[in-house]
Image: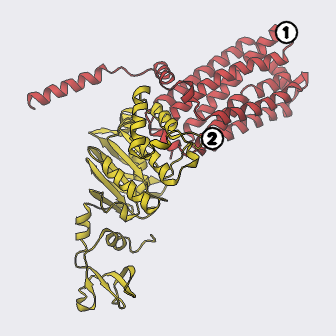
Amino acid sequence: MLSLNNVTKKYGKFTALQDIDLEFNSGVYALLAPNGAGKTTLIKMLTTLIFPTNGEILWNGDEIVKLDACYRNIIGYLPQDFGYYKNHSPRDFLLYLSAVKCIDRIPAKRKTDELLELVGLLDVKNKKMKKFSGGMIQRVGIAQAMLNDPKILILDEPTAGLDPKERVRFRNLISSLSKDRIVILSTHIVSDIETIANRVIMFKDHKLFANDDPAALCASLNGKIYETDIAIPNGCLALTERQENGKTITRFASETDCGDAAQSVSPNLEDVFLYVYRDEAV
Amino acid sequence: MDEQKKRASIDYILAQGLVTPQTTRSRITEMFRTLGPRYIFWDMGYSLLFAALTFALVMALFVVVPYDYRFSAAVAVAPLFFLLINVFAETSERACGLYELKQTCRYTIRQITALRVLCYSVAGAVLTAVVAIIKMETAYEFISMFTLCLAALFVCAALSMSVIRYVRKLWANAVFSAAWVFATAALTLSLGKPWETLLSNTPIIISVAVALIGIAFFVYQISKMLSEVDKYAVA
């Protein structure tokens, strides 16, 4: 189990995260928050790239920094800006990272081919990566994160810049990789996590705001979300708009019962996100 | 506490006690064996090329330095290859966008950098011999100049490693290298002949002692870079 106890991270006088208590067991955990809310800070602490100012991060009761290489052996990480060697093939690149991850050469070759097949890149395993699309590069990124068969897979904004088809493919891949391991996924794209996350973690004002399963988060807005094709009542929060039969349907949140003025609808995770972060520029 | 928990606790304590801490030497050997030269210097071709070309240019200038200032020039030039390759390698490493990812691997990029720096210091030591050969008149003068250059190289290497250890910024290396060039040029230009005389009359035993202190300090810095984790936040 991975746990954070009272973790605070400060950069000088700026507090990026404050008093965070979290526990991670097997499953997909989505960190959902707007840009600048502290998702990447948390991920960097979990990957030992930075250290908490206060508090502790424990893996099975031991501090991750003290575990040193033993902890790095069990994590797989895909950074937000995933760099790659343009003039090398994905196979060469994965073999190189296998060596850096201290995997013996023969198992590394076998694992590399297995992973390239899993991410659908076996056909191009010897092609230079400079010709790859963004989606293909992200798949190489996932493959490298899985090289050491990590118990903790940490993905920072893995779907940023991908087209919808690639995003769906990526979601399915993450879902298939989440058995018997902790997958921590940071994103501000709600559709990425709606179907695959077991728990959604939200930060607000640099503090933990919510840590619940998606259904429970949506249920927190039951009776508050409405749709209408006329002007929304005063004091309500407009969420989204869509065109239907030539009419503009507005989805909105209301703290009070709207009666016949609008139709009550089931809340979704996007509603929760827009409602929670209504005061922030998203 | 039941019997099973008690047994597990005893096994855990024994396991902890049986783990001998890894020495710097065994860590270096293990890393060399696992990574090999190919992966230690992975994608470093351009950095090595640029460093070699720049150093060749510096050497071309060094050859034409007046005879009266050969010791001052040799001391200034001796650590330059080491400094240049560090700057180029670190810049290339940070520019490729994999620095953070590599810091989360079993062998962190800081540890691999330490290993590379060790190799650069050996190459630097060989090049100091070349520097001394170019300007020597007698065998004694070669030894005098070579030991002086070695002292300059390892003092410089140790200082630059401590800068890298404590300052996480990319520019740290470049600023230190520029400071070295500036300091040695300033000493030569401002003090002139007395500086040259001081260097040329330095007893070999003093140069050897300074070189040995530099090597010890350098190895200490390398061993810290290989073993310490908690001071090396990279982001």
Q: How is the image coloured?
A: by chain
Crowding near the residue tagged with mark 2, few <14, some 14–19, many ≥20 C-alpha atoms within 10 Å: some
Colour seen for chain A: yellow
Image: B81 above or below A131: above
B69 on left or right of A278: right
Chain at tag 1: B
Give percent across and percent down for residue A46.
Answer: 38, 46
At label 2, which amino acid type do we have?
A: Ser
A243 on left or right of B8: right
Q: Nearer the viewer, mark 2 or mark 1?
A: 2
Q: CA distance from mark 2 to mark 1?
A: 41 Å
Image: B169 above or below B82: below
Residue A18 in sight here: yes
SS for dot 2: helix
Image: A256 above or below B44: below
The residue indicated by pointer 1 is B138
Give percent across and percent down for residue B144.
Answer: 77, 13
Chain at tag 2: B
Residue A9 in sight here: no
Q: Of B190 and A67, which appears nearest the observer?
A: A67
Colour seen for chain B: red
Give percent across and percent down for residue A39.
Answer: 41, 56
At label 1, which amino acid type do we have?
A: Thr
Please report the residue visible at 43 percent of the width from the left and 41 percent of the height from the top.
A116
The image quadrant where one finds the C terminus of chain A is bottom left
Please report the residue visible at 48 percent of the width from the left and 39 percent of the height from the top.
B103
Is disc 2 in the same subunit as disc 1? yes
Label number found at residue B92:
2
Label number found at residue B85:
none
Q: Of B157 and A28, which appears nearest the observer?
A: A28
